Image: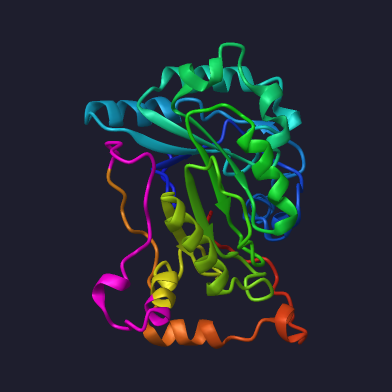
């Protein structure tokens, strides 16, 4: 089983690797940085030999009478056109592993419908295939519209990296939302403001949508996993109240007997949160800031 530092999954599975830019959120792509550091080409898709990963995870979950979550294509895009010849085998694996819920996150939701298997039947045979899209800027709202048009068992939106206010996003028909700031060398240039994350949290709370806050912006992922909780406590005038600084991490659907998750991220101390909140942001101040060279950071 390929373990992951992604807070909302038990494992990752990359049936292929490589991708190409598909929007503004790709500017700080962790997958590109990782593969280039390893001396691998990123803009050319390549088939991998990780086919047993989901079956291993399925056996673990089934043995405990539980369900697992697997993030698919953390180093690619499941619906990339260059993977069309390989996708049928991936669908077969998804169908075989009924104790694993596969999160198929894409920046190409307009391609989903043509890439579904012939026996999709509105997703009923693939109730463990959760379809999601990335939407961290207002220009990407159309992706959510495309996702909403696909019949499936669960739709989710990853608002990461959150690069500007998306407080007017339409979340109707969405079953889960995850929010996070950018990791990697551009985290200061594109710092997520906590009020932007709070806007989405408020929308989800009003609609009863499970919400997961992943991280603040930082060089490494899973830093400041309690930052939004601290902000909301401040907003409510309840600084220091233990109940208001819990991690905001809900998983769909309610009642699903999931394998336990292990908290892997780092919480902000009061001083770290204050530093983050007061840190100037080039996009807001107009000040120039040197972009750091690529350096290792965790997968998102």
Q: Camera-side residue: 148 or 259?
A: 148
Indicate left or right for 32 with 208 as reference. right
* Residue 39, image x, y percentages: 69, 49
* Residue 226, image x, y percentages: 39, 70
Residues shaded magenta: 233-259
* Residue 98, image x, y percentages: 38, 22
Q: Can residue 212 be seen in this view?
A: no
Indicate left or right for 134 with 58 as reference. right
Q: Is residue 5 above or below residue 106?
A: below
Q: Quadrant of the N terminus?
A: top left
Is 243 magenta? The answer is yes
Q: Can residue 117 be seen in this view?
A: yes
- Name the residue rendered at 66%, 65% in the picture: 163
* Residue 113, image x, y percentages: 67, 25
Q: Is residue 61 above or below residue 171?
A: above
- Name the residue rendered at 75%, 55% in the picture: 139
Q: In which quarter of the image is residue 159?
A: bottom right
Could you tell me what secondary structure mostly forms the magenta stretch?
loop
Is 34 magenta? The answer is no
- Name the residue rendered at 50%, 53% in the picture: 178
Q: Residue furthest left?
A: 64
Q: Residue furthest front?
A: 206
Q: Is residue 201 above or below residue 63?
A: below
- Name the residue rendered at 36%, 31% in the picture: 57
Q: Camera-side residue: 207 or 98?
A: 207
């Amino acid at each position: 089983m390929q373990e992951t530092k992604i807070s909302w999954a038990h494992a990752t599975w990359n049936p292929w690797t490589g991708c190409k830019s598909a929007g503004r959120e790709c500017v700080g792509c962790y997958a590109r940085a990782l593969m280039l550091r390893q001396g691998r080409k990123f803009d050319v898709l390549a088939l991998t030999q990780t086919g047993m990963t989901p079956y291993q995870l399925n056996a673990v979950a089934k043995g405990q009478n539980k369900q697992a979550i697997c993030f698919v294509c953390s180093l690619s895009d499941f619906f990339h056109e260059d993977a069309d010849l390989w996708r049928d085998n991936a669908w077969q694996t998804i169908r075989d592993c009924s104790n694993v819920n596969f999160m198929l996150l894409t920046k190409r939701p307009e391609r989903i419908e043509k890439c579904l298997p012939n026996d999709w039947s509105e997703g009923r045979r693939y109730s463990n295939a959760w379809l999601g899209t990335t939407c961290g800027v207002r220009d990407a709202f159309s992706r959510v519209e495309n996702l909403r048009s696909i019949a499936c068992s669960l739709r989710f939106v990853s608002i990461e990296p959150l690069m500007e206010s998306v407080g007017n996003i339409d979340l109707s028909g969405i079953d889960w939302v995850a929010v996070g700031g950018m990791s990697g060398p551009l985290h200061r240039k594109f710092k997520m403001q906590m009020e932007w994350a709070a806007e989405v949290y408020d929308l989800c709370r009003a609609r009863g949508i499970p919400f997961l806050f992943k991280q603040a912006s930082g060089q490494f992922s899973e830093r400041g996993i309690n930052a939004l909780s601290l902000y909301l406590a401040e907003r409510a005038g309840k600084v220091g109240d233990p109940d208001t600084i819990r991690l905001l991490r809900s998983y769909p659907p309610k009642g699903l007997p999931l394998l336990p998750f292990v908290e892997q991220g780092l919480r902000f101390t009061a001083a770290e949160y204050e530093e983050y909140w007061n840190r100037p942001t080039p996009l807001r101040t107009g000040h120039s800031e040197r972009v750091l060279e690529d350096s290792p950071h965790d997968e998102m």
